[in-house]
Image: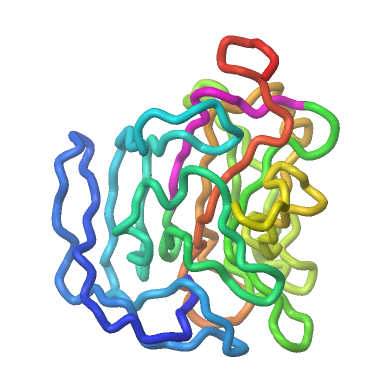
Amino acid sequence: MKRPLLALGALLALGACTGDSEPVPMPDGEVLDAGIADAGVPDAGTEADAGTEADAGTDADAGSRPVDPFADRVTAYHFGDSAGFGQDRFPDVVLGPPVGAGQYTGSLDVLSLGREGSITLEFTDLLAVDGPGVDLLVFENAFQKVGGDIFAEPARVAVSDDGLTWFDFPCAATDKDGGFPGCAGTHPVHSTPDNGVSPTDPVAAGGDGFDLADVGLARARFVRLTDTGLNSYGGTSGGFDLDALAVVNGQLADGGVP
């Protein structure tokens, strides 16, 4: 979880859902820090006491949506240490299109999972299917620092068609010099709703692309992201910051063609 440039200076009323969907308060003392992101670029962040986390197995969504290529529902989540940013807009903040900030700035339209936190999302209308090239895009808020390095907090990606059997993409989370190949959260996001860049174009949109053929899966309804606890900047990881998911090669839930 990266830190914002500007002090937000307000205590958030943060919450999480238990397995029966009853809200429970987050521990006291959770605030957004007036920290500064590496290279002076604004990005998401918060400071939380160790042990501040939330667990749930919930079906959270943002209400009825038209058919689109984006995640429709959160089915489970677990917030790790230093999570917090974005929970006041959860789950909407991770549903719908990416809101990228470009090559050199990290977006604040994200949910921070915290160290080793995880989240599972579901596509209910348009499912990812194995087609030519990249089938799924994962958008975080990585950005390029002055000097060329990418500020990254990688996550492992797993996919499933039924929510029971999972297929894990290989993620070289310790290969910083190689750019964490196979992990999500390693490329800046260029697509945003008002700039005309298609969020389903793997070349132009940014983010990290995944080909279902690499794990031998024909169709994916569920996507699980798990923070690796590692990062490009050393020290304690602040956690993966999820912006959005997008289907590149898709099929309607009933098997039809979109």
Q: Residue at x 37, y 66 (%)?
A: 85
Foreground pick, 120 / 205: 205
Residue 152 in percent (x, y) is at 63, 70
Which of the 4 image quarters holds residue 142?
bottom right
Measuring from the top left, give residue 241's x and y in whole percent.
50, 62
Residue 105, image x, y percentages: 62, 75
At 45% from the left and 40% from the top, the residue drawn is: 120
Residue 128 counted in the magenta span: yes
Tell me: 189 left or right of 130.
left
Residue extent of the magenta highlight: 118-130
Tell me: residue 221, above or below residue 106: above
Quarter occupied by residue 161:
top right
**Helix, strand or loop for the magenta stretch, by majority:** strand
Q: Can residue 178 be found in the magenta stretch?
A: no
Q: Where, by quadrant of the figure, is residue 79 drawn?
A: bottom left
Q: Is residue 220 above or below residue 237?
A: above
Residue at the far right in the pictured view = 132
Quarter of the rendering occupied by the C terminus: top right
Residue 16 falls left or right of residue 109: left
Q: How is the image coloured?
A: rainbow
Give the image location of residue 130, x and y in percent. Answer: 75, 26
Count of numbered circles on the image: 0
Seen in the picture, residue 123 relative to 242 is either above or below; the reply is: above
In the image, what residue occupies the spot 33% across and 81% down?
A: 8
Name the residue: 57% across, 10% down. Answer: 254
